[in-house]
Image (cartoon, helix red, strand yellow):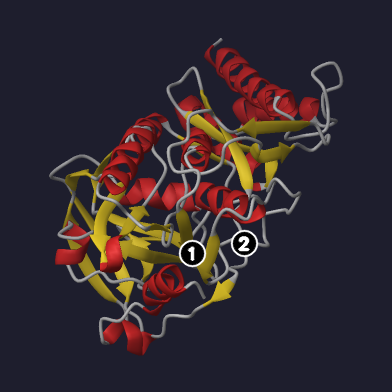
Amino acid sequence: MLRINGLSVIAILIVVLIAVLLIIGCIGFTNDDPPEGIDVVEEVWSIILDDFVGSEALDDEALTEAAIRGLLESLEDPYTVYLDPEYAEISREELEGGITGIGAAITIRDNMLTVVMPLDSSPAEKAGIKSGDKILEVDGESTLEMSLVEAMLKIRGEEGTKVKLSVLHMDEETPVYIEIVREKIDVPSVYFEMIADDIAHISITSFTGRTDSEFEASLSDALEQGSSGIILDLRNNYGGLVDSAVNVVSEFVEEGIVVYAMDNEEARRDWSMTKGGIALDISLVVLTNANSASASEVVAGALQDYDRATLIGTTTYGKGSMQHVLYLSNGGALHVTFAKWYTPDGRQIHDKGIDPDIEVEVTSEDIENGRDPQLERAITFLTEGS
């Protein structure tokens, strides 16, 4: 009886999972036309539970999660991932603007987990983590087969707990082990300062639930202080909520669409400007680099298409796929790619990125000498007009 119940729970979860994928358009079938082979999956479970030596000790939850991960791995999409209940809660907190971890933005570059930027005064920075470092292991587990979401969430955890990283510093050949105590990272998503010639430098590090209010406050301050131009810095911004990206663009452009998405059946959804932008005419430069991804590429692409801003820097990352976050009955979550983003003029972002109008590289020598040629070029452009 226990075996039959175990089979029923697992089979039902698998069917439900596939049904979810079908509903959101990840697989080209409908619930009335299930994919061939689902009966074989149930058959395999039955054989395992009936014939496998030691089947009475099988863990239904572990088997279910293994089945889910196996299904998702077959899609060969690093952004479609399953998060168990613990990691799902951490992910939810991140989207709300709160993080418990080491305080470093990471990405996958050349198939390796790479540090984009440690936050100022964060545990990561204090431990010697630097931009460009490769994280090879998390608590003894190799990161080579991890998705970006899985790696991020494994590095995070409860405040006060430790995480041990194997780190390969830039220009080094031998990795080192670094143990870091996780802390509560209350990170603003927007930073603002007035710089040379009354130019406002506004950096957005990610698009979270708090970005809208923070950005509006910074932009209002800039205008009240008589800013002659704005540098919107999206470098090392790994993305976030598309609605926040739409609201940022809407401060600079009066009407039109910001971005649209196409699913696997070529059904289109548009995201349009919100009314009431307060910076429709001020001179604007956007800074981008290879670590500007996802929602930051939406902003850069839209402002470029409307000739509203000049982009300076390097080509963006090219992460132009869109994910649903679906919370499951077990407390876990499913991040599923269901569409690709396009700029208002129809340029595909995914795997292509957004090219700057003025290309400016930052060399290792620039970094060592504390120079920022991209920011310098933006200032020159706003002050001299070229």
For the residue marked with disc 1, what is the amino acid? Thr
Determine which residue is flagged by label 2: 354
Q: In this rendering, would 186 be left or right of 10?
A: left
Determine which residue is flagged by label 1: 288
Residue at the image point whose x is 61% and y is 59% from the top: 318
Q: Looking at this view, is 41 or 118 the one in front?
A: 118
Residue at the image point whose x is 63% and y is 55% from the top: 307
Residue at the image point whose x is 72% and y is 53% from the top: 348
Q: Which of the 4 quarters of the picture holds residue 46? A: top right
Residue 283 at least partly seen: yes
Q: Position of residue 128 (x, y in %)?
A: 19, 71
Q: Position of residue 385 (x, y in %)?
A: 49, 72
Residue at the image point whose x is 32% and y is 54% from the top: 227
Q: Looking at this view, is 128 or 13 the one in front?
A: 128
Q: Secondary structure at mark 1?
A: strand
Q: Are marks 1 and 2 in contact (CB under 8 Å)?
A: yes
Does residue 188 sit above or below 51 in this rendering? below
Q: Looking at this view, is 196 or 68 the one in front?
A: 196
For the residue marked with disc 2, what is the amino acid? Ile
User: In terms of sequence position, does the residue under pointer 1 or pointer 2 come before the other?
Assistant: 1
Question: In the drawing, what numbered circle is on residue 115?
Answer: none
Q: In this rendering, would 173 be left or right of 292?
A: left
